[in-house]
Image (cartoon, rainbow, N blue to C red):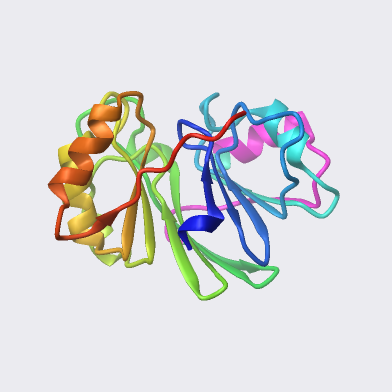
Amino acid sequence: MQENLHWFGNSAFRFDGSKTIYFDPWKLAAHAKKADIIFISHEHFDHLSNYDIQNICLATTVIICNNDAAAQLKKDKPPCKDIRAMLPGDRIETGGVTVRAVPSYNLNKAYHTKESKKLGFIVSIDNISIYHGGDTDKIPEMSGYGCDIAILPIGGTYTMGPREAAEAALIIKPKFAVPMHYDSARDAKEFQDLLKNKIEVKILKKEAR
């Protein structure tokens, strides 16, 4: 599982399986691998990048996102097959991949309100379930998330920090956790140390863009 997951900084990931899946592609290389499915957690510029989406789109690509991102993408008109807007709690299936949209919001910050219906995603592909948290804090809904891989923001300014993210991981109980949306290697190490002997933490090396 770990070898198939690639991190490009911030919240941008690619999973290589029976389908090539991207989460929040941003500042990718010009020759980046094309996408079967693109997940956009919300409309902020470092999550919804029209340049990067255009770069990895094919005529068969499906984009899955929240309502505000869908409205922006319909103006940008990427060369994809479909743009599917989801709300927290929705479930869909596309090309053998099952998608559950879950809430992603801040509890004590104004950046990502619950009312704005920004998303995290729990994606099931090739008998693996992957949770990508988007820009979230530790929220009550996480008690029902269950997954193999939990990709959690730990940056602390716009999202939860390392300690809160470690608490979230203990609630979700994935097979392993991957930190994202951080700048300091110290934060990633703190997150890993807090989960030592509890949950395996994989700190991915940021790949060249």
User: How far from the left and from the top, in percent, is residue 67?
Assistant: 56, 42
Residue at the image point whose x is 28% and y is 23% from the top: 157
- Residue 91 vertical placement versus 152 (above, below): below
Residue at the image point whose x is 86% and y is 49% from the top: 59
Residue 123 appears left or right of 97: left
User: How far from the left and from the top, in percent, is residue 68?
Assistant: 56, 36
User: How far from the left and from the top, in percent, is residue 81?
Assistant: 81, 52
- Residue 65 vertical placement versus 149 (above, below): above
Residue at the image point whose x is 62% and y is 53% from the top: 21
Residue at the image point whose x is 68% and y is 62% from the top: 19
Quarter assignment of residue 187: top left
- Residue 83 vertical placement versus 70 (above, below): below
Residue extending furthest toward the bottom: 127
Residue 72 is inside the magenta segment: yes
Q: Nearer the viewer, residue 131 or 199?
A: 199
Q: Nearer the viewer, residue 88 or 17?
A: 17
Residue 125 appears left or right of 181: right
Q: Nearer the viewer, residue 24 or 17?
A: 17
* Segment tinted magenta in the rendering: 68-89
Residue 79 is inside the magenta segment: yes
Q: Nearer the viewer, residue 75 or 136?
A: 136
Marks counted in the figure total 0
Residue 61 appears left or right of 88: right
User: How far from the left and from the top, in percent, is residue 11?
Assistant: 47, 37
Quadrant of the image containing the C terminus: top right
